């Protein structure tokens, strides 16, 4: 996402975009032993489905909020990477998009449990440029 000092607003934008583009796991697509159904018209309708409530969407839609530190992290909430973790993963505490893409093959050992998310600010010319949300919400 483009950088926004309001990380919660950036998350809301990411969620809206993901829903609008249909870039999420839809359990009613006919492949999972359930009857095929069209995708919902709203996020509220999506989450009203009991199967979706159980399985999630395997996307940023499964992350509902952000918190200020990893110590505050809880399920369905994205926490910021610490400077130490960013340094370990990217070789810098101000990673660029290139640093982030190179690290994609690295073990994301900060993601310890399903349902937890993280975010990291990515820099361009040492200025905040993007926010990347990541985590594991499904198989």
Image: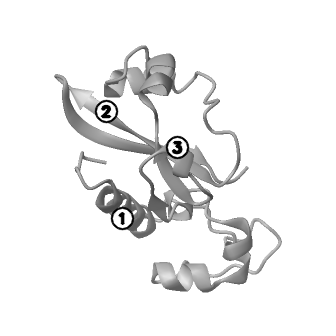
Report the residue marked by disc 2: 122
Q: Is residue 98 above or below residue 45?
A: above
Earlier-in-chain disc, 1 versus 2 = 1
Residue 17, image x, y percentages: 36, 63
Report the residue marked by disc 3: 70
Q: Taking 123 as reference, is 33 left or right?
A: right
Tell us which disc is closer to us: 3 or 2: 3
Earlier-in-chain disc, 3 versus 2 = 3
Residue 88, image x, y percentages: 51, 18
Q: Taking 70 as reference, is 12 left or right?
A: left
Dot label at residue 29? none
Say which quarter of the image contains residue 34.
Answer: bottom right
Asked if disc 3 and disc 2 are in contact, CB closer than 8 Å, the reply is no
Earlier-in-chain disc, 3 versus 1 = 1
Asked if disc 1 and disc 2 are in contact, CB closer than 8 Å, the reply is no
Residue ranking furthest to the top:
91
Please state which of residues 75 and 13 is positioned toward the viewer in this rendering.
Answer: 75
**Residue visible at 41% across and 27% down?**
83
**Residue visible at 48% across and 47% down?**
79
């Amino acid at each position: 996402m483009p950088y926004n000092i309001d990380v919660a607003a950036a998350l809301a934008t990411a969620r809206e975009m993901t829903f609008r583009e249909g870039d999420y796991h839809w359990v009613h697509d006919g492949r999972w032993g359930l009857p095929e159904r069209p995708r919902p018209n709203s996020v509220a309708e999506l989450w009203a489905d009991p199967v979706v409530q159980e399985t999630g969407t395997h996307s940023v839609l499964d992350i509902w909020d952000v918190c200020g530190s990893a110590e505050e992290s809880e399920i369905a909430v994205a926490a910021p990477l610490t400077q130490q973790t960013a340094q370990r993963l990217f070789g810098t505490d101000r990673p660029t998009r290139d640093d982030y893409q190179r690290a994609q093959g690295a073990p994301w050992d900060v993601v310890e449990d399903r349902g937890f998310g993280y975010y990291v600010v990515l820099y361009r010319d040492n200025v905040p440029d993007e926010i990347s949300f990541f985590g594991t919400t499904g198989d």
